[in-house]
Image: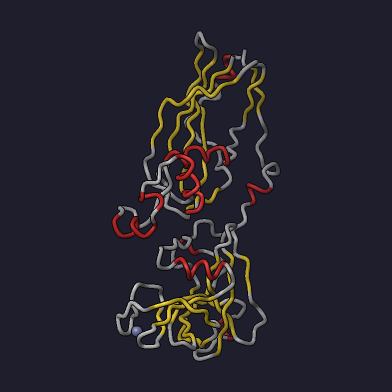
Amino acid sequence: MSTNKPMPMPTSISAPFWEGLKAGRILMQHCGACDQWTFYPRRHCSHCWSSQVEFREVSGEGRLYTFTVARVPTLPEFAGPEPQLMAVVELDEGVRLNTTLVGVSADEVEVGMRVKPVRARVAEDGTVLLRFTSAHVDLEEVDEVPRQPAATAPAEDARPVRQIPLSDETALQSLVSEEFSPWSNQVLVDQDMINQFAELSGDRYWIHTDPERARKEGPFGGTIAHGALVQILMSRMQVDLGYEITGFTNMVNYGSERLRFPSPVPAGSLIHARGRVKSVERSRRGTQLVLELNVHVVGQERPAVINDLIILYM
Ligand SMILES: [Zn+2]
């Protein structure tokens, strides 16, 4: 199952196209000066450079201009049901789109055949990609929202939990390990979530909130999540550390010994986390356990967040 497919990052120019798809409409730019159509969305007509372009709804019907059968994913992120029928479709308005054919097998596909649009829902937030199928196939919508088995059925393959009494010094020390736990469930960090965090925190810096500017001027080719957002999303990731400490009266989050953001989380990324017990120490305040929690973009070696969390048991 693919888990890290890039998601569309609407700009002020392309947003009507993406919003249209969410609402079940296909919007293409039409030029008032030369009466021709343009795709992808841009400021100027690609035929006459006039800026008199406006979005208009089209049927999405057209013909197959060309296609190829991809039997292995073109990138790991695009792994899915193979083979994939990657296609260029020419709409009746004359514009050509890169897309994928669904609902047909490779031997049913022929260059020049009539095609019609299929809405592919790809994320929980309602994001829709435009796919196509044969005009004869009864298919209008497909559901490609990634399913996250860890999030829906956490208990089934959970490891046995070790009960460790707070008074058992030897058992506590045996928790310390160089080895990390299994990965947690995955969480999608999309532009909508980043925007909400920008509002909440007041950090509306363009590298987080302005996809168009971030694409043009930023070092990451698009917007990225706030480090602090990724850090607090830890609460949505269930890390199975395999133990449970018992026999305490109070447990407090005492802060962090080390907090680093070594790599960015681009908008549209899936993240997951894992952890390990780094140290256990007795002090006057109580028993202090340092938990190293690392958040990664799925598939990335380098962590996005390293947080050495101090948990104090009393
Ligand atoms: Zn024009």
Residue drawn at x 46%, y 65% is 15
Q: Position of residue 221 (x, y in %)?
A: 34, 57
Number of numbered discs: 0
Q: Quadrant of residue 124?
A: bottom right
Q: Position of residue 286 (x, y in %)?
A: 54, 12
Q: Position of residue 258 (x, y in %)?
A: 40, 28
**Vertical comparison of 105 with 277: above or below:** below
Q: Quadrant of the N terminus?
A: bottom right
Residue drawn at x 53%, y 76% is 26
Q: Ligand 1, what quadrant?
A: bottom left
> In the displayed image of the protein, which residue is found farthest to the bottom?
112
> In the displayed image of the protein, which residue is found farthest to the top?
284
> In the displayed image of the protein, which residue is found farthest to the right?
156
Residue drawn at x 34%, y 55% is 214
Residue 290 or 226: which is nearer the viewer? 226
Q: Position of residue 176 (x, y in %)?
A: 51, 25
**Vertical comparison of 21 with 58: above or below:** above
**Vertical comparison of 284 with 11: above or below:** above
Question: What colour scheme does the image use?
Answer: secondary structure
Residue drawn at x 57%, y 83% is 116
Q: Quadrant of the C terminus?
A: top right
Residue 17 or 61: which is nearer the viewer? 17
